[in-house]
Image (spheres, rainbow, N blue to C red):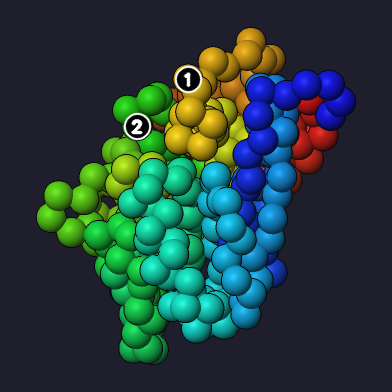
Amino acid sequence: MSGATRGKLTVVHLYPREMSIYGDLGNVRAMAVRLRRHGFEAEVVAHHPGAELPAGADIVIGGGGQDSGQARVGEDLERNGPRLAELARDGVPMLVVCGMYQLFGRDFVTVTGNRLPGLGILDVSTTGGSHRMIGPVVVETGFGRIAGYENHSGRTVRGPGQEPLGTVLYGKGNDGTDGTEGAVRDNVYGTYLHGPVLPANPALTDRLIAAAVERSLGIAFEPRELDDSLADAARTRPIEGLLSGREDERPGSLPGRIGAAFTDRLTRVRG
């Protein structure tokens, strides 16, 4: 992107090989495009197991992975955990999805009984189950309704005082019983929503950007007027269908609506 920018922000992508399934790479791409459309320079830095956590992280994003992927990053996550916890306390905005959401909690016990220690940044604990929770999700949050797609067998329980991301209007959420989805502490957002979640939910993207701009650049975030019609359609049409019970919007159709096709089109938008 040529010309003067409003500042530069570094997006750190945690474990893009091991923890980036169900379209979660689209979150990183959508974040970078959204930053540029708002007039900021965006640098994306990948963090792989065995490397030092990049310095100067302004936004951190981690995706989902299978139990094997979580195990492969466990040693590196333990080594870099104190730094990630420090960044979280310092207000760095973070989005962690599914498998990384679980590892940002206190622990994750697999279906075979293997305990993977977490970072404790979010006060949640997860236990693997034999039944997967799969399908579209609609969540009521403090900044509006968001939509995505869940695919997890882990049951996540929030500790006392741990705020959820929102209330489930459709789908299963954290454990399929308590009616909540995700967890939020300071600027750290944990969620089971794939989709990927950011392309279809620009309000969530802008919340992360605003926190990064204010913390890292020391200025108030003044969003530009952007055309979000495609993202709005990716979110509102499935929501309307799911909550009204229309058969053509039942589980199985949503991934196609807010998944790869939308991600590809949104992330190709020129800043």
Left or right: where 198 falls relative to 144: right
* Front residue of this view, candidates 271 and 2: 2
Q: Which is closer to the viewer, label 1 or label 2?
A: 1
Position in image of residue 23 (x %, y %): 66, 53
Q: Secondary structure at mark 2?
A: strand
* Front residue of this view, candidates 75 and 235: 75
Left or right: where 78 falls relative to 113: right
How far apart are labels 1 and 2 at the CA level?
23 Å
Q: Secondary structure at mark 1?
A: loop
What's under tag 2, amino acid-wise? Thr
What residue is disc 2 on?
A: 141
Q: Is residue 153 visible?
A: no
Position in image of residue 85 (x %, y %): 37, 61
Q: In the image, what residue occupies the spot 64% across and 74% down?
A: 51
What's under tag 1, amino acid-wise? Ala
What residue is disc 1 on?
A: 220
Left or right: where 24 falls relative to 247: right
Q: From the image, which quarter does the N terminus lie in?
A: top right
Quadrant of residue 7 in the image?
Answer: top right
Q: From the image, which quarter does the C terminus lie in?
A: top right
